[in-house]
Image (spheres, rainbow, N blue to C red):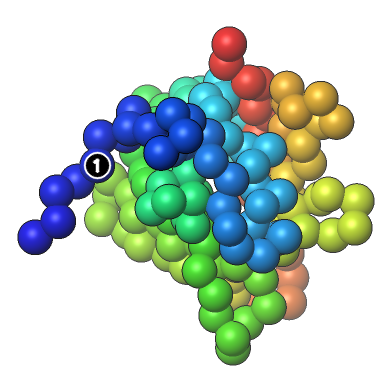
Amino acid sequence: MAERQDPASTDPDGQPESARRPPGPAELRQLDALVGKWHTSGVMRAAPGEAPIRITGTDTYEWVAGGCFLAHWVDVWIGEERVQAIEIIGGSDASRRGCPMRSFDSQGNFLTMYASVDAHGVWTFSDDSARATLVISDDRSRMTGSWERTEDGESWLPWMDMEFTRAG
């Protein structure tokens, strides 16, 4: 069994592995803008007549497996409930357009979404029941995200509005 590498390990050039850019397709390399720790805040829209639910915490992105995948750790509070998740972004799926994103959370859920980026650098994450757009500021210090959900695959409803500010 292979020994797990220390996340702070360095490559042969002395660079931290987490700082290495991936050798994969250009679309995956564009995810480099996410690398680092982010302060997370936002709201989850509630049912009509109910107050929105506040979301706060952190999101951290780091290149892993020699820069072939991007790991995304989530540690947030949604109202009074703590939610933690890990997401692995990368690989290929010839049957779908976009980059697979596989997430696993502290409630035992797992999900596969697909990421794509347009010519303006706007990211879209989607599966059959949810979709999001993520816009990264030109200076890479802030991001905004808007999530929508559907129950029938046709009518999309606003779900979450998020803001991310780079930590340090």
- Which quarter of the picture shows residue 53? top right
Above or below, comparing residue 61 to residue 86 in the picture: above
Q: Secondary structure at mark 1?
A: loop
In this rendering, would 160 be left or right of 108? right
- Answer yes or no: is residue 30 visible: yes
View extreme (front): residue: 13
In this rendering, would 105 be left or right of 147? left
- Which quarter of the picture shows residue 35? top right
Residue depicted at 59% across the width and 86% down the height:
94
| Image quadrant where one finds the N terminus | bottom left
Q: How far from the left and from the top, in percent, is residue 37?
A: 52, 25
Residue depicted at 43% across the width and 51% down the height:
66
In this rendering, would 50 be left or right of 124? left
Q: In the image shown, does 142 or 127 lie closer to the viewer?
A: 142
- Which quarter of the picture shows residue 43? top right
Q: How far from the left and from the top, in percent, is residue 109?
A: 32, 59
Residue depicted at 74% across the width and 70% down the height:
155
Q: Which residue is mark 1?
A: 5
Q: How far from the left and from the top, in percent, is residue 135?
A: 78, 41
| Image quadrant where one finds the C terminus | top right
Q: How far from the left and from the top, in percent, is residue 92?
A: 54, 75
For disc 1, the neighbor class at 10 Å (few under 14, some 14 to 19, many from 20) is few
Residue depicted at 34% across the width and 28% down the height:
8
Above or below, comparing residue 116 to residue 77 in the picture: below
Amino acid tagged 1: Gln
- Answer yes or no: is residue 113 visible: no
View extreme (left): residue: 1
Q: In the image shown, does 123 or 82 lie closer to the viewer?
A: 123
